[in-house]
Amino acid sequence: MKQSRTKGLFGRIRSIPGVRTVAGQVFVLQIAIVLLLVVAAVVALLLQSRNDVNMAARDRSVAVAETFAQSPGIQTALKSPDPTQVLQPIADNVVRTANVDFLVVTDTNAIRYTHPIPDRIGKQFVGNIQPALDGEVVVEWITGTIGPLVQAIVPVTEDDGTVIGTVTSGVTVENVTGRANEQLPVVVGAGGAALVLATGGAALISTRLRRQTHGLGPTEMTRMYDHHDAVLHAVREGVIIVDGERRLVLVNDEARRLLGLPPGAEGRRVAEYDLSPPIAELLESGRSVTDEVYPAGDLLLAVNQRATGESGGPPGSVATLRDTTELRELSGRADVAHARLRLLYQAGLKIGSTLDVVQTAGELTDFAVPRFADFATVDLLERILTGDEPIATGRNSYPMRRVALSGVRADPPIYPEGSLINFVSATPQATGFQSGQAMLEADLGAYAGWQEQDPVRARRMVHYGLHSMISVPLRARGDVLGVVTFWRSRTPQSFDQDDVSVAEELVARAALAVDNARRYTREHTMAVTLQRSLLPSVLPQQRALDVAHRYMPAHAAVGGVGGDWFDVIPLSGARVAMVVGDVVGHGLHAAATMGRLRTAVHNFAALDLSPDELLWNLDELVTRIDQDEAGGARAAMTGATCLYMIYDPVSRRCTMARAGHLEPALVSPDGGVEFPELPGGPPLGLGGMPFETMELELPEGSRLVLFTDGLIESRERDIDTGLELLRRALATAPPTPEGTCGAVLDALLPDQPTDDVALLVARTMVLAEDQVADWDVASDPSAVRTMREAVTEKLAAWGLDELAFTTELVLSELITNAIRYTSGPIRVRLIRDRTLICEVWDSSSTSPHLRHAATMDEGGRGLFLVAQFADRWGTRYTADGKIIWAEQPLPEE
């Protein structure tokens, strides 16, 4: 707060007119200094005066007390019966005559015998009399009964030195101060006179200083001198000031250099110097000119001159000089620097537009030709092309693959694109690879060692016109990825060191883009490898559908591998399930998530669940996984979609459901295309809504087309446009699944897809009537025997007599269980497919389970025997009951 007040005070002082100038501020400063000195002198005189008065009071007190203590009769008075009656009148007289304020006599017990105030007599003395009782004289400043005072205590002794009392004499502070104040007018008067004299002298000096400084303030003067110094030494333009008598008043360093003037030229006439006549005439005349060019030796100077008196200044003129020769040279250099900066800026825009290593290298060579070179090549370590780590700087050379070549002509005699080159140690490429530095070959015709790579080719190159070369290692983050080489042939100027700097900058920008592409390629390769390892490599064999599939990962440079998947899963009863799904996102996480979902679908499909139940269970699983990972570092998988369908070749019925996925396309045998209005469901992991199924009866030869959104949707078209293109492609596609896949991809997929594409095309087939046999079974144990005979007869007709015994055993057990535990209708069905399938239908929803019977148990061995004789067995539920099925392999033909 105090500091802010001080600043405010100085601010108010500086705002007073006249104080803003140097003279005014010097005046204020002098007055302040004089005032401080006068105040200090007055205070010192007052303190000295007061100190002198105090010392005089002390001496007076001691003298009066000692005189009174040694006066005749003092001893007798102290020993008298009433010392006060004797001593009090004497003490009062001494006080009046000795100019002290009090005189107190006490006994050895500090009891007063005398005092200026009568009622204080007989009371205890205020002060320390013990030193006096010991024979010493004591002087002290105390606050007594009459106020602050200085007092001297002196012992009264007998002839033998025994102390019989004390005498105290003192002067009050009021008395001392009053005497000191008497001297104050003299001191203050002297200080005032000194202040008046000093103020007058300061005013005189300030007035003269104001005239000398023209009333400028310190800031303006500092700025003026800074500008003056800059004009003299720092300005890259000559400045000459000439007064009215044509004398040089100011010549800066640049003017001396341009005109050849010696140091100390100021003060002499213009005519005294051997200047160029036109310039000398101009300076002598003082006329105004603007940007007129005058010769000065080997230079051409652009001169501007104005009269100084036009703006109210003194007579004369000021001229400025510029060397247009140097300006032209500097302008040329600036143009070159600007062109190179523009080149590098454009390189940043053109190079690295994708995350593809080879394409990025091609963008570098295409940009460099013909802007910087006539030919440009990029040679990369082969490990870079697969995303592997590069080689540290300083290692020996490794074989490199030429991945990019651009030139002004199509027939250069250099290694073509795709060549595998192992540069020998004498070549600039190998030297730069090992040192990490750019190498310049300004004259290829000198054959300084670069030709050792291929002498025959080297002669052809020189004959072709290649005359200079720059080889720059492609370095990123301290590692060498390869080598970039620039060549000139048509351009007559050879490469120089300035070109080397440009080449290094150009390659440095490209190197980061290439390394980023390499890193992305590595991650993309890992993701693709993981993705393909999680997708089915070979579809399972079955006779319900003729299936073809395609999986196309997104191009590494524009999207990367995602989480699309497909699957074909054989089910019981010769049925087949088909599924396609899509996990939102790209990269390893999407691929890993896809693998988890595909595994879950397989597990749920093994339970023979309907499509809506399977999707419900899959949604619950995804929800639980998301909840478990919500607090962890891994991202949730919410956003996956799925389409699941089951086709039965016996009934020709297809049941399907979807979770946020696109509807499938259905191509009829006559070529008609439709998209069934399958009820939609939320994507997996959102929950809250049930999934609905749709059931279609398909003619034999129908084609089911399942796909992910990457097939029909892109940045260039929306879903509706993609669906229409798909409809047209399917309408004209060959009837085979393989032909359909090829036609669809050719029609809809770009060269570099931005999203994964999973495509599954299945043509339906139907089991012939003689491949299926079914019977209704009465709910009577005697029907088992009849059923065995019918089955044996059917197997004989199929040529499967070898399976008759095991089939009778399996069906006997299953039919017996159905008769024992259900009361509704029972059906038996045999299907001859790739296996022999036995099915027993009943109305019970209770599922039997396999158990191991004990030695003494009478039952419990039926399903155990079924499991032993059948290759696979299981249970699936229907709307009105369940089906227990068992499969046996057919005998080899």
Image: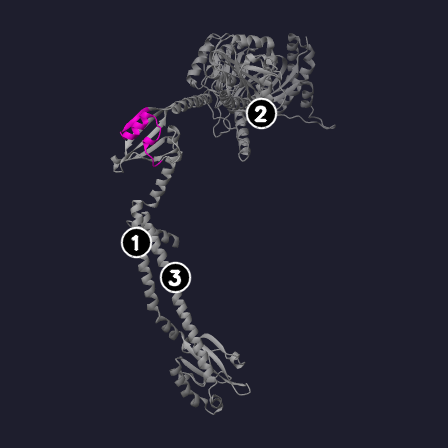
What secondary structure is marked by label 3?
A: helix
Q: Nearer the viewer, residue 120 or 136?
A: 136
What secondary structure is marked by label 2?
A: strand
Where is residue 478? Give x, y as percent: 57, 27
What secondary structure is marked by label 1?
A: helix
Q: Nearer the viewer, residue 695 or 717?
A: 717
Q: Label 3 amino acid?
A: Ala
Where is residue 735? Give x, y as percent: 51, 7
The C terminus is located in which quarter?
top right
Where is residue 672? Give x, y as percent: 45, 10
Q: Please state the total of marks drawn on the protein image.
A: 3
The span from disc 3 to disc 2 (Cα, nearest Å) is 77 Å
The answer to whether one can see residue 268 in this image is yes
Which numbered dot is residue 479? Answer: 2
The residue singled out by tag 1 in the image is 203
**1 vs 3, front mark:** 1
The answer to whether one can see residue 547 in this image is no
Q: Label 2 amino acid?
A: Asp
Q: Earlier in the sequence, mark 1 or mark 2?
A: 1
Q: Is residue 274 magenta?
A: yes
Q: Earlier in the sequence, mark 3 or mark 2?
A: 3
Q: Which residue of the protein is positioned furthest toward the bottom in this rendering?
A: 81
- The residue located at (38%, 83%) in the rendering is 97
Q: Earlier in the sequence, mark 1 or mark 3?
A: 3
Q: Which residues are magenta?
A: 266-293
Q: Label 1 amino acid?
A: Ala
Say left or right for 402 vs 33. Answer: right
Q: Which residue of the protein is positioned furthest toward the right in this rendering?
A: 855
The N terminus is located in which quarter?
bottom left
The span from disc 1 to disc 2 (Cα, nearest Å) is 77 Å
The residue singled out by tag 3 in the image is 40
The answer to whether the residue labelled 1 contacts the one labelled 2, judged by CB atoms less than 8 Å apart, is: no
